[in-house]
Image (spheres, helix red, strand yellow):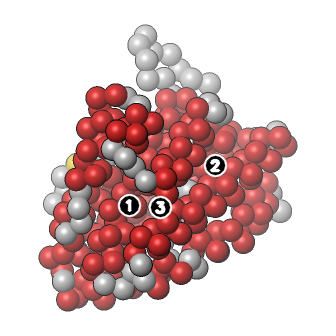
Amino acid sequence: MNKIDNLLSEISETRNKLLNHTIYNKLNDINSISKFMEIHVFAVWDFMSLTKSLQKILTCVETPWYPTKDKISRRLINEIVLGEESDIDQNNNPVSHFELYVESMKKIGSDTNKINEFLNEIIETKSHKKAVEKCLIPTGISDFLNFTFDTIDSNKPHIIASVFTFGREDLIPDMFINIVKTLNKKNETKIGDLLYYLERHIEMDGDEHGPMALQMISELCKDDENKWKEATKMSKKALEMRIKLWDYIETSLN
């Protein structure tokens, strides 16, 4: 068993716990999905901060420019950023996955005021902690965000890449996709954008970004046993934090 397979084996139990979370039994109508999205959008947003932090570490985003050492990881993260930050919508217009998600929220009838207020504070203060405080973001969300930014602040690319990879949005069980497809047949104008977002994300994660992210972890850890231990520990922690977020959302749906 190679090192990446060993990591996957170590986190499989926690990952399965997340994929089988009871929250999915409650996401069975437009109203519940709408409320879910109002909270989940913060995880969609903070995923982009993880993405860009990796790009900042692994590539040169400064002037004067210089070539960074890790050529393979440099290419991998740049390809991932292209897809996440500048994908295409149903009409072939450039759009980030976050923007695509927010548009899906609008169509389904979710309240986007809180995430928009939060983003405005981010733009003004450049601080997620100040934005959390000013916007009165609940602890159930802020704990998740704080974990992400603590990870970023570690400035350790192998740890950031691990949290990035295993806290990803590809953790969407088939059951939820089938529910959305069924609802889409009855409410295409409301659900269509969300279904596109989910299918687009699954397509890119499965065929492109998922394998790239795993390769990136391997490149960053190489044969350093301590790095592999840290990567495994933080991958599991990322899944546990997602479970806690799901717990919070499930409680909010009751």
Dot 3 and dot 2 residues touching (CB under 8 Å):
no
Label 2 SS = helix
Q: Residues within 10 Å of mark 1 (few under 14, many from 20)?
A: many
Label 3 SS = loop
Identify the residue under disc 2: 162
User: Residue 135 location, x and y as percent?
Assistant: 33, 44
Give the CA separation, mark 1 to mark 2.
23 Å
Dividing the picture into quadrants, the one containing residue 185 is bottom left
Q: Nearer the viewer, residue 60 or 234?
A: 234
User: Residue 16 location, x and y as percent?
Assistant: 64, 74
Residue kind at label 1, given as amino acid type: Ile
Mark drawn on residue 39: 1
Q: Please indicate, yes or no, whether residue 40 appears anywhere in the rendered image.
A: yes
Residue kind at label 2, given as amino acid type: Ser
Mark drawn on residue 169: 3
Write the residue at 41% across / 13% down: 63
Label 1 SS = helix
Write the residue at 60% across / 49% down: 163
Residue kind at label 3, given as amino acid type: Glu
Q: Nearer the viewer, residue 119 or 167?
A: 119
Q: Is residue 149 left or right of residue 98?
A: right
Give the CA separation, mark 1 to mark 3.
14 Å
Question: Farthest top residue?
Answer: 64
Residue 166, placed above or below residue 230: below
